[in-house]
Image (tube, rainbow, N blue to C red):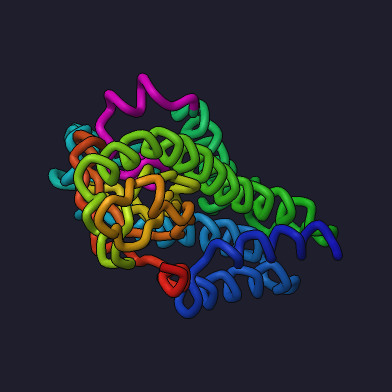
């Protein structure tokens, strides 16, 4: 596989099927139009526009401006987010800056500088000037550089978002453990008669999305349940104890971006196959 194809595949994996991938296919066609003197200009322009299209999908302007950290920039139209603000949103949504600054070891400024530099590298060929018009680039050196800039743009944002989401998930484990163990133990009561939930364990938290208002996640864990049979007269708790079992569960949770401890849980989804043993 050539370097060019590797970049194309990486970019396509980030783009949405349909419009975005169709635009990218048209951008690549410009790279192959060897008889067109605007070949490099059209290619770079299309690639740069594709960044704007993808950014608007993953960081819609209407959502960015609703974030608590959004401040209008004098250099853009009122009600419009800057490219920097869109990149911020693409990485951590509307999460309050107290979390971004204090809890998570992701150098947002460095990511934004890298991404901005990659955008500017594409911009140098979009304007038609004497030194950018009619570039042959028969070896696709410039095209490869432009594709590299575009794929690095995608990789940097996706990588920062994944790293940030992983750390948010780690922070939420204790919060969600407390929420479930303090307020939702009774949700396990229907599993069988004569049971007692001893504890719950959070195995994993998957971050599904972070928007301007909430962190949406799925929690996977298990409940440790002590089993017993019906107690006859004179029998002690020890006499009726049958052992313990583990009941896996999952639940969707929503946490406020302003206060991660402000949690709302959906109905727990429990695997009840163990209940036949009670």
- Residue 81 among those drawn in magenta: no
Examine the residues drawn in magenta and state their main secondary structure: helix
> Which residue is found at the position 38% from the left and 66% from the top?
270
Q: Is residue 264 above or below residue 118?
A: below
Q: Where residue 131 sits in the image (x, y, percent)? A: 65, 46
Return the residue nearer the eye: 241 or 114. Answer: 241
Return the residue nearer the eye: 106 or 37. Answer: 106
Q: Is residue 216 left or right of residue 78?
A: right
Instruction: Locate the N terminus by quadrant.
Output: bottom right
Q: Where residue 236 sits in the image (x, y, percent)? A: 33, 46
> Which residue is found at the position 25% from the left and 56% from the top?
233
How many numbered marks are there?
A: 0
Q: Is residue 207 something one can see in this rendering?
A: no
The residue range painted magenta reads 88-105
Q: Where residue 3 sits in the image (x, y, percent)? A: 81, 57
Quadrant in the picture for residue 267: bottom left
> Which residue is found at the position 34% from the left and 46% from the top?
237
């Amino acid at each position: 596989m050539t370097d060019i194809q590797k970049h194309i595949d990486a970019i396509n994996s980030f783009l949405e099927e349909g419009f975005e991938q169709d635009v990218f296919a048209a951008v690549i066609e410009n790279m192959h139009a060897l008889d067109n003197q605007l070949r490099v200009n059209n290619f770079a322009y299309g690639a740069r526009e594709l960044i704007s299209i993808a950014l608007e999908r993953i960081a819609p302007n209407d959502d960015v401006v609703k974030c608590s950290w959004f401040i209008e920039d004098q250099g853009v139209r009122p009600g419009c987010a800057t490219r920097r603000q869109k990149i911020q949103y693409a990485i951590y949504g509307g999460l309050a800056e107290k979390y971004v600054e204090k809890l998570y070891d992701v150098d947002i400024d460095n990511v934004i500088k890298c991404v901005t530099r990659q955008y500017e590298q594409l911009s140098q060929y979009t304007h038609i000037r004497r030194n950018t018009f009619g570039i042959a680039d028969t070896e696709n050196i410039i095209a490869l550089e432009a594709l590299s800039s575009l794929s690095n743009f995608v990789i940097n944002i996706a990588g920062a978002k994944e790293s940030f989401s992983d750390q948010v998930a780690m922070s939420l484990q204790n919060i969600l453990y407390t929420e479930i163990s303090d307020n939702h133990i009774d949700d396990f009561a229907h599993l069988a008669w004569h049971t007692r939930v001893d504890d719950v364990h959070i195995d994993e938290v998957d971050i599904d999305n972070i928007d301007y208002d909430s962190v949406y996640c799925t929690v996977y864990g298990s409940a440790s349940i002590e089993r017993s049979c019906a107690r006859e007269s004179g029998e002690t708790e020890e006499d009726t104890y049958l052992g313990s079992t583990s009941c896996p569960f999952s639940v969707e949770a929503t946490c406020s971006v302003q206060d991660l401890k402000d949690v709302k849980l959906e109905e727990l989804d429990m695997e009840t196959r163990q209940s036949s043993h009670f």
